[in-house]
């Protein structure tokens, strides 16, 4: 049969073991005290008996007989038995009929049993005429001492044992109560109450620390779920607008019976709308791929200067078309460890934004400079700039500033840049160029 739950908790087990160790310790202590006292008492008695047997053996025969007739030294109540035996062990005088069997006659005290049952300490000496003098003393005090020790043990140990087990049961009950509370909280969380937390009292015990760690984990899970929910809402929202627009256009063109040119224009507009939705889906998949893929393995040494020149070459014609001057200042090679394609994509996205926001006839500067943490790829435009309070927001997915509502885009370009930077453990810093803004892609050196 299994013991009730309360007796199976670690607290109760620890209390039980402590109680057992305590009882053992007390038993050893009492045994030691008893042994010390008993041996001291025995030594005192033995010394007295050995002295007495010597004195009596040396006294005048008349004195001796008188002492024996009196039945030992009754006045002092020290000697309970005193007797004189002849050379063959026959009693001559005294209050003992026979000498205990094989009792050594050497003037030294020994333990013996007299009259068949009484435990005594005794000493015997041979007189010059061959007779044997025997004296003995009761050791009832030792028996009393034993009784005292036993009573003290019972009175001290049993209540302590009950107390220890009671405390163990109490601790155990409290522990079980907390475990049940945790079970209830977990059950509620499993039912979908994500705001629920495990009970913790801010105390410093292991249980509370564990509960607090789990609660922090739940906070993080809740935050991530909120974020996912937010992204989901954003996706739905951002896809709905272009899709609604495409649908409306298609419907309108079906209703209006016009020429082939107009139908072509409607189809083109529909394709552009679908391209925008595809762009959103592609960008989201790209961010997911960057964030979840194991691309560290493909990291190699990349010369940022060369990479920046390559990006500038790609975007040169676009800038020229928009009437924007694109300058590049990256002469010295600057190496970092990374994924070339991804870093190029990040720089291209930032440059793309600069081209989108820069006014006509303005200039965009692309440069690789040295910073305290490592090389920096800097993109500077002369557009409207980004207000300080928006600089963190623009890096989040789907965030679009008010000024860009009329411009094409989905709010995911900087999301991709952010994901690439995070993958490389690089940083983005956005500053003021007055006019315009400066995007610094800070390529901190990786400790290998
Ligand atoms: P999108 O450009 O598609 O809106 P991004 O993620 O690339 O999305 O940019 C997010 C927002 O950051 C933009 O809507 C805009 O408000 C702001 N932004 C980005 N680059 C610049 C820039 N060079 N100048 C001014 N604002 C910018």
Image (cartoon, grey):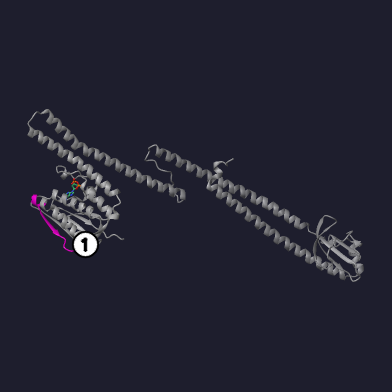
Tell me where residue 19 appears, x and y as whole percent.
Answer: 60, 51
Q: On screen, 322 above or below 39?
A: above
- Residue at point 87%, 66% (across, down): 133
Q: Is residue 222 visible?
A: yes
Residue 436 on the magenta segment: no
Q: On screen, 231 above or below 385?
A: above
Tell me where residue 16 appears, x and y as whole percent.
Answer: 58, 49
Residue 328 on the magenta segment: yes
Q: Is residue 322 visible?
A: no
- Residue at point 15%, 51% (across, down): 354
Tell me where residue 404 appears, x and y as whole percent.
Answer: 16, 44
Tell me where residue 76 appears, x and y as whole percent.
Answer: 82, 62
- Residue at point 16%, 42% (across, down): 405
> Which residue position is annotated with label 1?
334
- Give whichever of 374, 57 is nearer the camera: 374
Residue 101 appears left or right of 304: right
Residue 119 appears left or right of 238: right
Question: What is the magenta range?
Answer: 319-334
Q: Which quarter of the picture shows residue 275?
A: top left
- Residue at point 27%, 40% (across, down): 232
Q: Which corner quadrant holds the N terminus?
A: top right
Residue 256 appears left or right of 222: left
């Amino acid at each position: 049969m299994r013991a009730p739950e309360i007796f199976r908790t670690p607290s109760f087990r620890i209390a039980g073991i402590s109680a057992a160790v305590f009882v053992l310790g007390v038993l050893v202590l009492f045994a030691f005290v008893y042994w010390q006292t008993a041996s001291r008492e025995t030594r005192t008695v033995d010394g007295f008996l050995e002295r007495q047997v010597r004195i009596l053996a040396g006294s005048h025969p008349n004195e001796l007989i008188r002492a024996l007739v009196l039945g030992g030294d009754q006045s002092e109540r020290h000697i309970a038995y005193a007797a004189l035996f002849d050379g063959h062990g026959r009693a001559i005088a005294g209050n003992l009929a026979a000498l205990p069997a094989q009792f050594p006659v050497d003037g030294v005290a020994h333990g013996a049993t007299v009259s068949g049952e009484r435990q005594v300490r005794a000493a015997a000496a041979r007189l010059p005429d061959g007779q044997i003098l025997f004296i003995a003393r009761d050791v009832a005090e030792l028996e009393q001492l034993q009784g005292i020790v036993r009573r003290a043990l019972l009175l001290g140990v049993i209540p302590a044992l009950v107390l220890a087990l009671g405390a163990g049961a109490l601790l155990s009950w409290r522990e079980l109560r907390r475990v049940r509370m945790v079970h209830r909280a977990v059950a509620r969380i499993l039912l979908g109450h994500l705001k629920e937390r495990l009970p913790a009292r801010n105390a410093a015990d292991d249980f509370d620390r564990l509960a607090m760690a789990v609660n922090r984990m739940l906070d993080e899970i809740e935050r991530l779920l909120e974020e996912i929910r937010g992204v989901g809402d954003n996706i739905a929202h951002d896809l709905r607008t272009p899709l609604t627009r495409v649908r409306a256009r298609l419907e309108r063109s079906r209703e209006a019976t016009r020429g082939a040119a107009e139908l072509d224009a409607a189809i083109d507009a529909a394709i552009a709308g679908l391209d925008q939705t595809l762009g959103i889906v592609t960008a989201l998949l790209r961010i997911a791929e960057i964030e979840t893929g194991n691309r560290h393995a493909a990291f190699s040494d990349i010369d940022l200067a060369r990479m920046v020149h390559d990006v500038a070459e790609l975007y040169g014609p676009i800038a020229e078309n928009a009437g924007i001057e694109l300058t590049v200042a990256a002469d010295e090679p600057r190496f970092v460890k990374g994924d070339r394609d991804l870093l190029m994509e990040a720089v291209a996205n930032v440059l793309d934004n600069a081209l989108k926001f820069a006014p006509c006839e303005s200039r965009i500067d692309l440069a690789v400079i040295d910073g305290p943490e490592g090389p920096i790829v800097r993109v500077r435009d002369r557009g409207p700039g980004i207000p300080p309070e928006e600089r963190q927001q623009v890096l989040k997915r789907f965030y679009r500033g008010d000024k860009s509502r009329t411009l094409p885009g989905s709010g995911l370009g900087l999301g991709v840049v952010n994901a690439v930077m995070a993958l490389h453990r690089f940083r983005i810093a956005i500053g003021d160029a007055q006019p315009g803004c400066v995007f610094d892609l800070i390529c901190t050196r990786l400790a290998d």
